[in-house]
Image (cartoon, grey):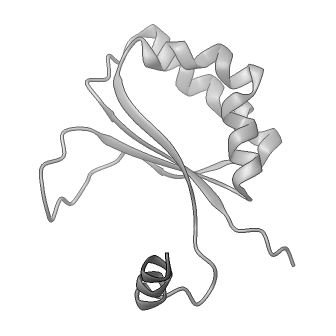
Amino acid sequence: MSDAIPSYAVAYLRDVEFGDEVIRYMREIDDTLRPFGGRFLVHGGDLDVREGHWNGALVIIGFPDRDSAVQWYESAAYQRILPLRLNNSVSMVALVDGVTPGHTGSARVDEILAG
């Protein structure tokens, strides 16, 4: 069993122009994810908004670890299709690590206070 902490690519997309370029991007992204163990966990869908105002789509892609997420994002295959999305949407994307089993909110407070 691996001790690697999973990592995630999290994207918030809005004003997506769903034309030929976005369709091509969506059809080709799966092949860019496979070599790095990436898989969609959330891919748009109907949001049940409980706080704030959402006017876009949420996408979360899971990876085995941070290195895999970075290598995917920086890969030639992904960089080749990235402009297809960037030129047809307003987006924010970040890579973030998950937490270890047993993680608690109070433990995070202790980490922050410890500096």
Q: Quadrant of the N terminus?
A: bottom right
Which residue appears farthest toward the right when viewing the image?
1
Viewer-proximal residue among 34 and 103: 103
Q: Quadrant of residue 73?
A: top right
Which residue appears farthest toward the front when viewing the image?
115
Viewer-proximal residue among 38 and 2: 2
Q: Does residue 82 appear to the left or right of 13 in the view shown?
A: right
Residue drawn at x 66%, y 19% is 79
Image position, residue 9 (x, y; %): 55, 47
Q: Does residue 1 appear to the left or right of 78 in the view shown?
A: right
Residue drawn at x 68%, y 46% is 69
Residue drawn at x 18%, y 39% is 55
Image position, residue 46 (x, y; %): 27, 51
Q: Quadrant of residue 34?
A: top right
Q: How many marks?
A: 0
Image position, residue 63 (x, y; %): 68, 54
Let me know if residue 24 appears in the view. no
Image position, residue 91 (x, y; %): 37, 30
Residue drawn at x 18%, y 46% is 54
Q: Does residue 72 appear to the left or right of 25 in the view shown?
A: right
Query: Compared to 33, does 102 lie above or below?
Result: below
Let me know if residue 106 appears in the view. yes
Viewer-proximal residue among 91 and 106: 106
